[in-house]
Amino acid sequence: MKKNPPSLTGYDMFSIQVLFFGASAGFIYPSMIVRSTTGAYWVPLVVWAAVALLSCLLYSKLLGRLQEGKLIDRLCQSAGIPAALIICLPQLIFIFGALVVMLRAYSELITMTMLPTTPITFLNGMLLAPGALALAGMMPIARAARVLYLISTLLSVCLMLIGFSDVKWTLGGPWLFTNGDFLMIRNFYSGSFIWMGFVFTALIGSYNPRISGRYRKSYIYALLLSFPMIAGFIYLPVMTFGRELTRHLTLPYISKMDSVYHYWVVFENLTALFVSVTMLYVLLVMALKLHALGESVKSLFPRANPIWIYGIVVLLVYASASALPSWRAVEGTIFYTLGLRLYALFGFPLLGLALLSVRERKRKVAS
């Protein structure tokens, strides 16, 4: 009988979720929200947060059906590996695409801000570090998350507080007006990716009804903590440059950090410091995604060698990220994978609940 993997503690899940928000909210997300509406920016945030909470509740209900086991393993036992593979394939493609986008986006960020002459193919080699961490297992990722959460969150909050020192609050308005125009703009839907950290933690570790409650609460607490920080990433550049100029910036928050200058600030280049802090978020989250993808593939192909699985995944992610021609291609990829994200949010947990319900009914009939 396969030994059940250990489960994450509530603090582990909370730390991972906060790091997930920080991994992309500061450099990819702000431009999408600023370009998506002429009304209050917090309204699209609240809409997606509500959608994410609904999806998290579905996943929590699904994980609560497990009895000390991994989600993909239970789906394979309930429906068989071929059927489970069909259900999981869009989920696996979604995770793969999320890895490609995050790796290439962060490499582009480094190129734009710090190392303009360094080849993207070289910068994409940073994937080796999270690949090694992912192969090491879930608990090394959790231990790293505990430490990085304290360091990176503290630094991010300090940088944000410094950024508030030279803003004009009137530029942030309108604060209450919205006409729902963001519902017709593609950038609003592209921004769904930052709310989905719970999707990845659902695929690693062992779950039961008690742990599923911990899973749900950790995401809610992380969302409550991170929401003001996400709003700060959006509103700080707007309250510095104004709405119209911010809409034309590729990386609004990076531009904001670059504009801050105070004689009393110890660090001369706040942009470089922010990029370095973001790297802590990104490397940990890429390790989480790689581990979720690797463990899912291992459950679907139990005879495969884990080293080969992770090695092939890393190579494919590296090659795909290097093949994207530009930053605009990264943004396009984020939008065109919306269907996969919606499947991951609602299709996968609903199908999983249906499969487990059918299996439970069959057991009752057999008994």
Image: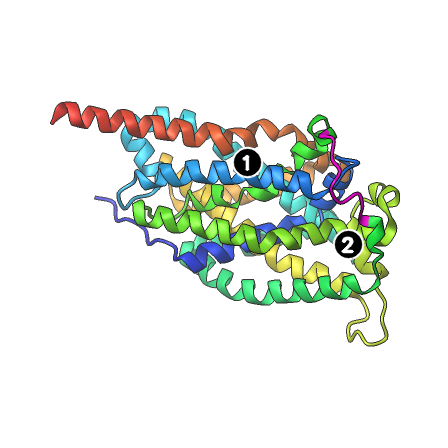
Q: Residue at x 71, y 30 (%)?
A: 180
Q: Is residue 176 magenta?
A: yes
Q: Nearer the viewer, residue 347 or 167?
A: 167
Q: Which mark is residue 192?
A: none
Q: Are marks 2 and 1 in contact (CB under 8 Å)?
A: no
Q: Nearer the viewer, residue 172 or 188?
A: 172
Say which amino acid is labelled 2: Leu
Task: Label the magenta part by its dominant secondary structure.
Answer: loop
Q: Which mark is residue 51?
A: 1
Say which amino acid is labelled 1: Val
Instruction: Find the residue positioned furthest to the left.
Output: 367
Q: Give the extent of the magenta segment.
A: 172-180
Residue 209 on image: x %, y %: 30, 45
Residue 255 on image: x %, y %: 82, 54
Q: Is residue 202 magenta?
A: no
Q: Is residue 21 left or right of residue 111?
A: left
Q: Which mark is residue 236?
A: 2
Q: Secondary structure at mark 2?
A: helix
Q: Residue at x 32, y 32 (%)?
A: 76
